[in-house]
Image: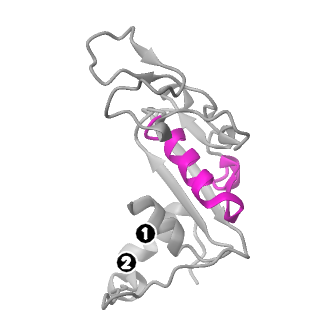
């Protein structure tokens, strides 16, 4: 899947931020959990405060446990909490919390109470270990096309650098 491909392309020592404009743990913590389980010690989860700009609220910590709604949606009272052999389709094992110590609380969940510009937002920051193998970027005839924004749109680049407080390299 696309998320795994991005993590495979990440260079050792590199970081990748996964974010959604959702507070659904199946789209958020379950995805982060699946990535951490798939890549094992090659991938770690950084504390959100390590990647947030200075002055930004920390948000609430990520969830380590959650309920999975029944896919029929006939009743909001029908939820699944544990992975069982009788799960209705399209529920998958990766949707459920494993209970393993994966440090999911390092993720950040932003609610409207965290500031005037937050309406429901999730953030997780991954780091790839220095010893992890990297999948080559070019394969089977695909040639990536990279655009140097600083050269093609210098005024827009300058605005981005200033807005986000970046240091141009």
The residue at which mark 2 appears reads as 155
In-image side of 115 versus 159 (left or right)? right
**Residue at 43% of width from left, 45% of height from top?**
20
Labelled disc at residue 89? none
Furthest residue in direction front, as rendered: 85
* Residue 43 placement, left or right of 89: right
Image height check: is 7 above or below 63? below
Q: Pointer 1: residues within 10 angstroms few (<14), some, or many (20+)?
A: few
Image location of residue 48, percent across then percent down: 65, 48
Q: Left of 35 or right of it: where is 146?
A: left
Residue at 39% over, 22% down? 69
Tell me residue 32's x, y (percent): 55, 47
**Which secondary structure lies at badge 1?**
helix
Q: Is residue 149 visible?
A: yes
Q: Is residue 21 above or below residue 156?
A: above
Write down the region rendered in magenta: 26-54
**In the rendered structure, does residue 19 fall within the stretch colored magenta?**
no
Q: How far apart are marks 2 and 1 (CA)?
A: 6 Å
Residue underneath mark 1: 159
Asked if residue 51 lies in the magenta stretch, the reply is yes
Q: Where is residue 124 in the image (x, y as percent from the top left)?
A: 57, 49
Q: Residue at x 73, y 40 (%)?
A: 101
CB under 8 Å between discs 2 and 1: yes
Looking at the rendering, which quadrant does residue 114 occupy? top right
- Image spot of residue 1 (x, y percent): 39, 60
Whether residue 86 is situated above or below residue 11 in the rendered picture: above
Q: Which colour scheme is used?
A: one colour
Observer-nearest of 153 and 6: 6
Q: Is mark 2 on a helix, strand or loop?
A: helix
């Amino acid at each position: 899947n696309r998320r795994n491909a991005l993590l495979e392309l990440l260079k050792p020592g590199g970081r990748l931020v996964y974010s959604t404009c959702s507070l659904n743990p199946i789209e958020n913590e379950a995805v982060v959990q699946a990535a951490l389980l798939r890549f094992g010690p090659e991938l770690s989860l950084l504390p959100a405060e390590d990647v947030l700009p200075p002055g930004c609220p920390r948000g609430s910590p990520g969830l380590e446990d959650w309920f999975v709604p029944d896919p029929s949606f006939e009743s909001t009272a029908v939820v699944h909490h544990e992975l069982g052999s009788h799960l209705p389709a399209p529920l998958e094992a990766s949707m459920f919390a494993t209970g393993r110590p994966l440090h999911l609380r390092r993720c950040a969940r932003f609610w409207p109470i965290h500031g005037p510009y937050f309406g429901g937002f999730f953030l997780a920051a991954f780091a790839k270990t220095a010893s992890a193998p990297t999948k080559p970027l070019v394969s089977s005839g695909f040639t990536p096309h990279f655009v140097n924004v600083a050269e093609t749109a210098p005024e827009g680049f300058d605005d981005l650098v200033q807005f986000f407080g970046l240091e141009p390299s």
